[in-house]
């Protein structure tokens, strides 16, 4: 339990780059380095997180904790992954409220992003060898990449990948119904009428967001804008964009944006209530779905669907990586950082956390020299 807590505290402190990078770092730590999970089991849990609402990387941490140490591990892994980011975002929110501006993060991002690209590419390479078991699954993966790049919703991509794998397994076209969530973007995520600002309404808003939201931090932006800016008028557009930016540039789950919003609206109690509200559904959903994952794998038809979902999940990671690379590798120094990081990971198996910290230091130094 102590090792589990220390690992996820460290990951929560150093895991920059969003869910794809978090997944890559967890794969490196729990599969390659410690052997807590097989690559197949890791992929199954990754696929399962994509089929339920909430922050995928946090849910994956909760799955790993449950697999390693049962129900206590479920709570410890999830809480330890969330806590460092929540504390850091809370400190930034305090400075924001006190001084009215965000600390500069341009240098950190400039150095960290190329490292993140290398970390995710390494994970895609190793996980892809396990997930792509046949030419059919390879074709499904290519189709998922194309669909995601064209803007098809993540859930539809995953559902179609699972359905195609089932149909391919059936061979004669005798398929099976594949249940999947409808996109929550058409759902109402808040109370029917505007509510006065208070801890209970704040908790309710973030609880509903955590219970129905699929997708990235940009989807989170759409949800929070509809609720907090347009309907409840608790935040301005600028405050919301600042909150999303803090969630993106700090390590750990992007959903700690809720911590920032809660602090801005209601101080430390608001930060605690908003954080609890948005992450609580993740623990509940994993607790309910986690025991089903091994049973799904034992079923021939359901196992085929999970194979398709796993390939689709990697396809989504690949598209996110490509999009990030376009903004991260902008000049010769950033390309060099990415190449050196890739060599360190693949050839010397350097721990990704140290590479992220080194990238942040290089980025800050470069930013300071340019400023001078």
Image (spheres, rainbow, N blue to C red):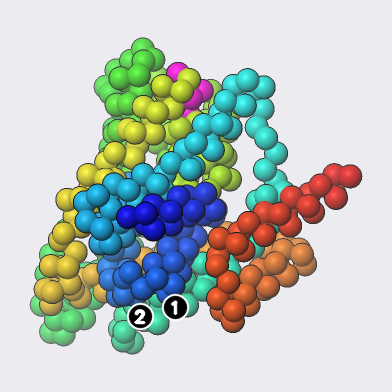
Seen in the picture, residue 214 relative to 272 is either above or below; the reply is below
Rendered location of residue 14, percent (x, y) = 54, 53
Q: Which residues are magenta?
A: 261-266
Rendered location of residue 352, percent (x, y) = 55, 65
Indicate which disc residue 305 carries: none
Q: Which residue is rendered at x = 29% and y = 26% of the image?
A: 204
Q: Which residue reaches farthest top?
A: 196
Horizontal side of 210 relative to 242 (left or right) equals left
Query: Would you say residue 167 sits in the magenta stretch?
Result: no
The mark total stands at 2
Cβ–Cβ under 8 Å for marks 1 and 2 = yes
Residue 213 picture quarter: top left
Q: Which residue reaches farthest right?
A: 372
10 Å crowding of disc 2: few (<14), some (14-19), many (20+) = some
Query: Label 1 belongs to which residue?
Result: 126
Q: Which residue is rendered at x = 51% and y = 67% of the image?
A: 120
Residue 296 picture quarter: bottom left
Horizontal side of 74 relative to 145 (left or right) equals left
Query: Label 2 belongs to which residue?
Result: 130
As helix, strand or loop, the secondary structure at mark 2 comes to helix
Q: CA distance from mark 1 to mark 2?
A: 7 Å
Q: Quadrant of the N terminus?
A: bottom left
Along the line of sight, the residue nearer the viewer: 59 or 165: 59
């Amino acid at each position: 339990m102590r090792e589990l807590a220390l690992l996820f505290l460290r990951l929560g402190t150093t895991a920059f780059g969003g869910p794809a990078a978090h997944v890559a770092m967890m794969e490196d730590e729990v599969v390659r380095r410690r052997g807590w999970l097989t690559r197949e089991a890791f992929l199954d849990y990754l696929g399962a997180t994509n089929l339920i609402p909430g922050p995928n990387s946090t849910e994956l941490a909760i799955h790993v904790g449950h697999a390693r140490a049962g129900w206590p591990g479920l709570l410890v892994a999830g809480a330890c992954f969330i806590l460092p980011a929540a504390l850091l975002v809370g400190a930034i929110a305090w400075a924001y409220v006190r001084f009215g501006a965000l600390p500069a993060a341009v240098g950190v991002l400039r150095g960290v992003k190329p490292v993140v690209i290398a970390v995710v590419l390494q994970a895609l390479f190793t996980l892809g060898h396990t997930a792509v078991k046949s030419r059919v699954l390879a074709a499904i993966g290519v189709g998922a990449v194309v669909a995601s790049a064209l803007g098809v919703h993540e859930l539809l991509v995953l559902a179609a990948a699972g359905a195609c794998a089932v149909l391919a397994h059936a061979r004669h076209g005798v398929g099976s119904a594949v249940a999947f969530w409808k996109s929550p973007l058409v759902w109402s995520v808040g109370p029917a009428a505007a509510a006065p600002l208070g801890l209970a309404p704040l908790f309710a808003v973030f609880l509903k967001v955590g219970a129905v939201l699929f997708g990235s931090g940009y989807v989170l932006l759409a949800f929070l804008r509809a609720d907090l800016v347009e309907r409840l008028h608790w935040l301005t557009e600028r405050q919301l964009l600042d909150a999303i930016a803090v969630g993106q540039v700090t390590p750990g789950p992007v959903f700690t944006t809720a911590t920032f919003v809660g602090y801005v609206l209601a101080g430390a109690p608001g930060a605690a209530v908003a954080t609890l509200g948005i992450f609580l559904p993740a623990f509940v959903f994993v607790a309910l779905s986690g025991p089903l994952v091994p049973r799904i794998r034992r079923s021939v038809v359901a196992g085929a669907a999970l194979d398709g979902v796993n390939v689709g999940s990697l396809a989504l990671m690949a598209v996110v990586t490509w999009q990030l690379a376009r903004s991260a590798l902008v000049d010769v120094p950033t390309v060099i950082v990415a190449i050196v990081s890739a060599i360190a990971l693949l050839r010397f198996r350097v721990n990704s956390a140290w590479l992220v910290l080194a990238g942040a230091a290089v980025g800050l130094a470069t930013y300071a020299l340019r400023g001078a």
